[in-house]
Image (spheres, rainbow, N blue to C red):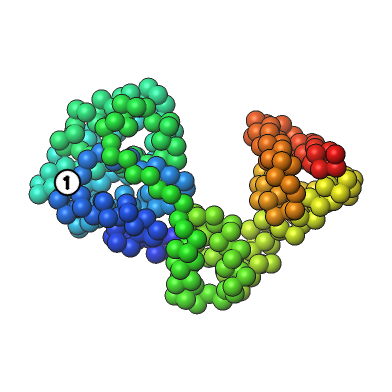
């Protein structure tokens, strides 16, 4: 049976967490004292928030960690009922490990909780703080109400450095005997963009499907826009060849099946590699942001991308 590498190689101790050395050092001091405050982990996906919470519980409780640790995803049940019943019932009971004296609730994607649910959670954190500690993780700490933030020690997880991701993926490729060349690794790092989980997943998917992890295989398996295709489309638009640029866009969307968001992200990434003056680039970035917003709000992707190419042609041929 094929194992998922993100789970197979998930660190079980804080020391094994990749790319978050400063956070690991601070949390290790809590483990040494056998005591933690309420914690708030904030940062992008794939930076180790969930892994850190689980590793912290394993080090803190040892073999009894599963009995003293409750993991929940707030995006599954985001209403006030989950706080009043499931969370409260777990928080009010005594810890299995009397040496530690408290249990831990890990609430993933806590920024998905409604304001009413967060209000109830604030009261629960306050009432059962002796018997239970909370670890909240979120992508955006600004969506967590201030009374909860003030009760937590906040840890901000930055994107993982490219060097750390490269070292980890290289070591993983050696363990799994994956054939990957330097160009393939560079493409993986660019697409992962500091998200280690995404990098590991892509490495497994491409190696399973293609054998060798090379740039062409990555683009083909993951249905990612190739930089060369995006650049060609942009150069045609900048040269005022709008109809040819539009034809390239049709090929990306129809033949390769790329979504509008995938293409616009590719445009944003490649626009900085084109020789244009700073003022023009500023205008283009502002225009790209406007069209992406329209698509996110539900506008037709094909029409918006065609309009974007028209805007690029106008802005660069004045």
Is residue 93 visible in the rendered image? The answer is no
Q: Is residue 79 above or below residue 40?
A: above
The residue sitting at the left extreme is 99
What residue is drawn where x is 71% and y is 58%? 227
User: Which residue in the protein does label 1 denote?
Assistant: 35
Q: As rendered, which of 312 and 61 lies closer to the eye?
A: 312
Question: Residue at 37% of width from left, 22% of height from top?
Answer: 116
Q: Is residue 295 above or below residue 203?
A: above
Query: Residue 209: x, y in percent?
Result: 61, 67
Q: Position of residue 289 (x, y in %)?
A: 66, 37
The quadrant in which residue 303 appears is top right
Q: Residue at x 67, y 61 (%)?
A: 219
- Mark 1 closeness class: few <14, some 14–19, many ≥20 residues within 10 Å: few
Q: Secondary structure at mark 1?
A: loop
> Which residue does the image show at 59% across and 66% down from the upper left?
186
The image quadrant where one finds the C terminus is top right
Q: Position of residue 24 (x, y in %)?
A: 30, 55
Residue 125: quarter of image = top left
Indicate the position of residue 172 as horizontal and vertical percent values. Answer: 45, 70
The answer to whether residue 191 of the structure is visible from this angle is yes
Instruction: Give the tally of numbered discs.
Output: 1
């Amino acid at each position: 049976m094929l194992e998922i590498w993100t789970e197979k190689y998930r660190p079980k101790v804080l020391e094994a967490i990749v790319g978050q050395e400063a956070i690991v050092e601070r949390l290790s001091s809590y483990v040494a004292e056998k005591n933690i405050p309420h914690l708030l982990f904030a940062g992008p996906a794939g930076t180790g928030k969930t892994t850190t919470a689980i590793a912290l519980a394993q080090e803190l409780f040892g073999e009894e960690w599963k009995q003293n640790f409750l993991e929940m995803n707030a995006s599954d049940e985001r209403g006030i009922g989950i706080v009043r019943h499931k969370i409260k019932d777990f928080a009010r009971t005594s810890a299995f490990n009397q040496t530690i004296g408290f249990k831990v609730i890990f609430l993933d994607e806590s920024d998905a909780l409604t304001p009413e649910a967060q209000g109830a959670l604030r009261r629960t954190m306050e009432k059962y703080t002796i018997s239970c500690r909370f670890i909240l993780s979120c992508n955006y700490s600004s969506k967590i109400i201030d009374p909860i933030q003030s009760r937590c020690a906040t840890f901000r997880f930055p994107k993982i450095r490219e060097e750390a991701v490269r070292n980890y993926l290289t070591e993983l490729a050696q363990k799994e005997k994956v054939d990957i060349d330097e160009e393939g690794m560079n493409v993986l790092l660019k697409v992962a963009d500091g998200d280690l989980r995404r990098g590991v997943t892509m490495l497994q998917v491409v190696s399973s499907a293609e054998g060798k992890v090379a740039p062409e295989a990555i683009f083909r398996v993951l249905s990612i826009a190739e930089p060369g295709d995006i650049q060609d489309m942009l150069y045609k638009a900048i040269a005022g060849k709008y109809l040819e640029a539009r034809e390239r866009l049709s090929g990306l969307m129809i033949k390769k099946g790329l979504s509008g968001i995938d293409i616009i992200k590719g445009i944003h990434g490649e626009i900085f590699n084109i020789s244009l003056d700073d003022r023009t680039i500023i205008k283009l970035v502002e225009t790209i942001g406007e069209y992406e917003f329209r698509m996110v709000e539900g506008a037709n992707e094909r029409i918006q991308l065609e309009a974007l190419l028209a805007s690029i042609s106008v802005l660069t041929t004045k």
